[in-house]
Image: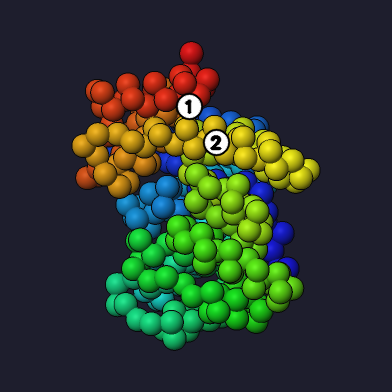
Amino acid sequence: MSSQIRGVVPPLAIPLKNGELDVASLERHINRMIGAGLNGLFVSGSTGEVAFSTSERRQQIQREVVRIVDGRVPLLVGVIDTETERVIENIKAVEEIGGALGVVATAPFYALGGQAEIEKHFRILKENTNLELWAYDIPVCVHTKLQNDLVLRLGKEGILDGVKDSSGDDVGFRWLSRANEAAGHPLQLLTGHEVVVDGAYMSGADGSVPGLANVDPDGYVRQWQAFERGDWEAVRAEQDRLADLMRIVLVKGVQGFGAGVGAFKTALQLLGVFDSNEMPRPVAALEGDNVEHVASVLREAGLLS
């Protein structure tokens, strides 16, 4: 096992105000999450607006997160980009700033290739960093599914340290978990499928990367602690509650990033953590009835009085 990262490692949502990083809200947010007992943070992931951020914004976010976290939890930083050379540039920027345990990369996603090109991509990335290298499996965004035999082979060779699985393929994840155990657990496996984390833990996941943990970090930490002590009924019960909370994303007239991350940010504003639910251009912030919908779900969950 090449990485010690395990447990709840949420993808950090990013507060904005007037188009700029809202550092005061970010500090409240991070301290709240660490106070809940999470096990790490994933910076510049999909929830963290990596696809909307310039290089300068990515670096600003990392610097502020490193300053605020101050070594209290390990950090994974997304270096997600279209092709290999651009990812290497992002890795060098992460290394220059410091504070990261590992970097997280997807398959290339503009000049699409096959598994051979993806394998070479990760091998080249590993040649260019001494940080942990994690693969991010998110075919809905990059249009390519990372194959189990590929990531397992790269894990056994020490190229990959872990996989952040947001494929939504629960059958494939279970097969990967079983193959990983049979091979001696060369990979740390984290699920990003926040509504069925209990199933992933049963399959053999080493932790979770739930976007919803931005809203309710305590719930996911309680679930992890229940898993650690073998209390499967508590794991399931917490997941049922979190599944109900995830209904904040069922807003009307809004799709994709604007619905999911938009709902997380709106919830954080309603909870007094973020000053604004502002979204990166060109995505509109939730308003009107959609804000009330988020508030009603928070109230049902006992998070908002």
> Which percent across, then down, holds residue 101?
63, 59
| 215 relative position to 249: left or right | right
> Which percent across, then down, holds residue 223?
65, 39
Query: Which residue is rendered at x = 50% and y = 24% of the image?
Result: 301
The vertical placement of 183 against 19, above or below, is below
Q: Secondary structure at mark 1?
A: loop
Q: Residues within 10 Å of mark 1 (few under 14, many from 20)?
A: many
- Would residue 70 be seen by someone viewing this image from the given angle? no
Instruction: Report which quarter residue 288 is drawn in.
Output: top left
Lower position in the chain sequence, tag 1 or tag 2: 2
- According to the picture, the residue beneath numbered tag 1 turns out to be 273
Query: Which residue is rendered at x = 42% and y = 47% of the image?
Result: 47
**What is the three-letter code of the residue carrying label 1?**
Val
* Furthest-bottom residue in this view: 116
The vertical placement of 198 against 34, above or below, is below
User: Disc number at residue 157?
Assistant: none
> Which percent across, then down, holds residue 254?
24, 39
* Furthest-top residue in this view: 305
Viewer-proximal residue among 261 and 75: 261
- According to the picture, the residue beneath numbered tag 2 turns out to be 240
> Which percent across, then down, holds residue 72?
68, 43
Viewer-proximal residue among 294 and 53: 294
Q: Residues within 10 Å of mark 2 (few under 14, many from 20)?
A: some
